[in-house]
Amino acid sequence: MSVIPDAPDPFARDRGGPAQPLLSVSGLYKHFPVRKAGGKKQVVRAVDGVDFDVLKGETLGIVGESGCGKSTTAKLLMGLIERDSGSLLYDGQAVGERVMPWRSYRRQVQMVFQDSYASLNPRMTVEQSIAFGPKVNGVPGREAVERARALLARVGLEPKRFAGRYPHEISGGQRQRVNIARSLALEPRLVLLDEAVSALDKSVEAQVLNLLLDLKAEFGLTYIFISHDLNVVRFISDRVMVMYLGRVSEIGPSDTVLDAPAHPYTEALLASMPSLDPDNRTEVALLAGDPPNPIDPPSGCRFHPRCSLAEPVCSEKEPPLDTIGPLHRVSCLARQPGSGHSSAPARALAA
Amino acid sequence: MSNPEPAVTLGNLRVAFGKVQVVDGVDLTVERGQAMALIGESGSGKSVTLRAILRLFHEGRSRIEGTILAAGRDVQALSRRQLADFRGGDVSMIFQEPLLAFDPVYTVGRQITEAIHRHEKISKDDARKRALALFERVRIPSPERRLDNYPHEMSGGMRQRAMIALALACRPQVLLADEPTTALDATVQIQVLLLLRELQRDLGLSIIIVTHDLGAAVEVADRIAVMYAGKIVETGTAHQVVLDPHHPYTIGLLRSRAEGALAKGSRLQTIPGSPPDLANRPPGCPFAPRCFLVEERCRQEMPPVGEISPGHKVACWRTDEASAAYRAGPTPVRAAELAPA
Amino acid sequence: MTAPITAASMALDGGVLSTGDAAPEAAFVPSRGFWGHVGHRLVRDPVAMGAGAVILLVVLIAILSPWITPMDPYKGSMLRRLKHVGDATYWLGSDELGRDMISRLMLGSRLSLFIGVTPVLIAFVIGSAIGILAGYVGGWTNTILMRTIDVFFAFPSVLLAIALSGALGAGIFNSIVSLTCVFVPQIARVAESVTTGIRKRDYIDAAKLSGASPLTIMRVQVLGNVVGPIFVYATSLISVSMILASGLSFLGLGVRPPEPEWGLMLNTLRTAIYANPVVAALPGVCIFVVSIAFNMFSDGLRAAMEIRQ
């Protein structure tokens, strides 16, 4: 079914088997230099040592507040900005090196942006935007356009009506469908959705979420789903990663993480979700103030100034991302045996 | 409150921009000390309804009809000068983006004291004291120092608090909030929502909050009004609207939320289609083309507003069927006749 | 709902299909395209249309002037000098050598338009190329190109035009060259800032992700979006260019007599300012009207190009 001609693309087929992560990220760092008033040079530690795997066929949700580095992580994963250090392994193959240059990686990994309008060229029709990718990859024009129309139909937009439209002539939900169609035009295996439904109205959001579920099943996709909305992430994700100030604070199966959070920050995030029960409204906000600035993050555990479990040891020691259950890892001294935190569990005696 | 007169009364409010009838006959009453949430999706006319209370439109390009009574004044009858006093004095407003409400070249403290001076004769020191008290009131940490901050020196949540302080500077009776928490992070949003609730309780403030987020509405509001295509389709207490909805649109909104999914990863119930083109309103109920209970008369005639129970008003011909469908559970909510061949 | 994914359920959720859309006439409206929209909105702007009509009229006169002038624009008469406006033979009076003003103004529009518009057109091509390159490539290329451009900004454009014309010598060609040099930096600057803005848009990132080469992205994704705003800016420069060109002629650095050109006519008629002020002012009025027309038209174009979401 591949229309990309210079196949066989060695990366289009599975290589490492189902057990091997589709994407493996380790030691990812990105610091942005900034000049503050007074000429002092400082760095924004946007992504500060992030490791995670994306398993084949799963949806990994990434949640966190502004400044937590989730969008920077997305751009690093796509190579839109250069990483300071760290490695990306796609199906066991190092990305950005000779065997797998960015160009062939990007055929396998595509992205949908938050702003449906800014991510479409205002001077191109919907169909031209979708056909652009296949065209630059060598698909003849006619075929690329046919492919674009088929994809439009697949995302629920009747090609006859929509193919010739310009982005400003269609609604936000329709534009996001076009963006999704474009991301699929190169037949990727992994799609990164960066706040892809956040700007949509709730009823439209539900339509697009359903579409994403269908497409995933149909094309055997793997998703990385970035969002600030825990309800949506809970709905769509198999596993969830919670980020705070450029670090991973907790990662695990979404039922575990969102129903029995191990990290106090995850707990606070969950408690901040407005309740939908008028008889049982939220009475106290667990967290005060805004998330701190990633320019000058707190020492030790970055969450300790806002944490209800904080102890002196938390400001001294950086908590490692420790495994506490099946696939469940958390970076909190209170959950790490022998960390020196008073509520830390006892060290397991036998392995 | 002993005063029996409502804080805000809108009677058959209609707002049009050119040929586009954005608000189409809204009746709304907000009692004193009450918090009302106007919810709806983009294009439902909720923001325009809110702004009409302050007549925040370009006079030449808009047409406002109907009665608007707020804080005991007839807003339609106010002269330009009276309107300037009325805005910020009797009724004030906070916005989604606080950076737009503040002038970047003055400190926040100065802008608040100036707002006080504009409405009252008061000494400089007293104005500053009032500003400080306001900052404490909205729980800004180290308020003395923060008064001398410029807007860009504050974080998003703090700016939102500062804007609320600015809005409260002249002791208004009514506070209008237009998507006040949409741009905020989750952990900050809940703080601001709780603050609004606290202000309502402690100052006896009447609040109208416009939001697209049902959750945020439930957190703040005593009563909720659901808007669709420029009309209020359902009003009632938060309890009535969220737990006992009688309008198919409200039901659709509740059903389409991700947390309402039966099981993780199962398909969500959605409202098919998209909102109508306001420039070409179909006759009858504007929701009819998307409704799962639509019948012929819905397309002909706008249903009248009926009272289901005290204070719970719904504009639908088939409230009983809608309610029954909601109680029966999520599955049957489908619009069979909408499926294309 | 764990319904199987069927075409019907897709269509249902897809809602945006024809049946789900509540506005029946929204269906099957052929898309106008971007320029279609711009044209549609421009036609509804009376000011821009008025200005456009003035420009069109002047252009027509310029093209047809050799055949339609009522009298010979070069033939003077010592007896009939400085006739007043409204004269039976000379409708708009005559100049200091007794030549028919209306004929000279008509024929003068040719040169005035030519040396007003040509430098802007050339500068539009060169300046856009420099600016788009600098804006899209960024980094060092940008710094070097834009700093060089900045040097030209140190001089007021009038002085720069006079200095260059003076150095190159009088003549139409040299005036055009010097005016082009004046406008290239200005257009390049605008082109650079527009391109830099576009470069940060998500759709450029999306194009990068599709594996397109920088040149393809520049050609397909960037060019179409930057040309419009640059063009609008360039049209607003035509008025400046016309005034500068007239100024050069006025100073004797542009067109040489006896060729009629509005700036030059203004110069030669200045001796008659007390004898016949109305006639002496006529070339100035022409310059004024045409340059204002260009300005208003470019304003209208800019407004029409602001597409809303």
Image (spheres, coloured by chain):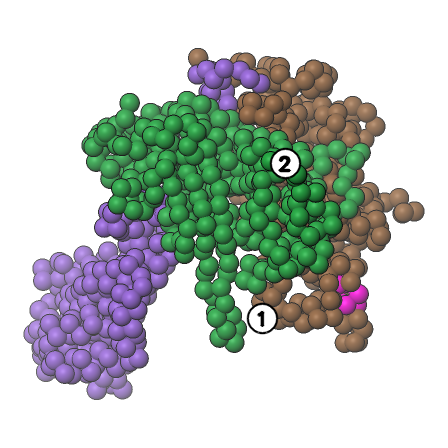
The percent position of residue C84, horizontal first and vertical second, equals 23, 76
The percent position of residue A346, horizontal first and vertical second, equals 70, 42
Q: Colour of chain C?
A: purple
Which amino acid, by three-letter code, is at mark 1? Val
Magenta region, main secondary structure: helix
Circles 2 and 1 in contact, beta carbons < 8 Å = no
The percent position of residue A155, horizontal first and vertical second, equals 42, 27
Q: Colour of chain A?
A: green
Q: Mark 1 points at which residue?
A: B105
Looking at the picture, does residue B59 appear above or below residue A207? Answer: below
Q: Mark 2 lies on which chain?
A: A
The percent position of residue A77, horizontal first and vertical second, equals 41, 45
Q: Is residue C277 visible?
A: yes
Numbered disc in front, either 2 or 1: 2
Q: Chain B is drawn in which colour?
A: brown
Which quarter of the figure has residue C200? bottom left
Q: Residue A350 carries which label?
A: 2
Which quarter of the figure has residue A82? bottom left
Q: What element carries label 1?
A: loop
Is residue B305 left or right of C132 when viewed as pictured?
Answer: right
Q: Mark 1 lies on which chain?
A: B
Q: For the magenta stretch, what is the residue range? A: B130-135
Question: Residue at (37%, 35%) from the top-left corner?
Answer: A91
Which quarter of the figure has residue A56? top left
Q: Nearer the viewer, residue A324 or A296?
A: A324
Looking at the picture, does residue B130 appear above or below residue B159? Answer: below
Furthest residue to the front?
Answer: A350
Furthest residue to the right?
Answer: B2
Is residue B217 left or right of C271 when viewed as pictured?
Answer: right
Which amino acid, by three-letter code, is at mark 2? Ala
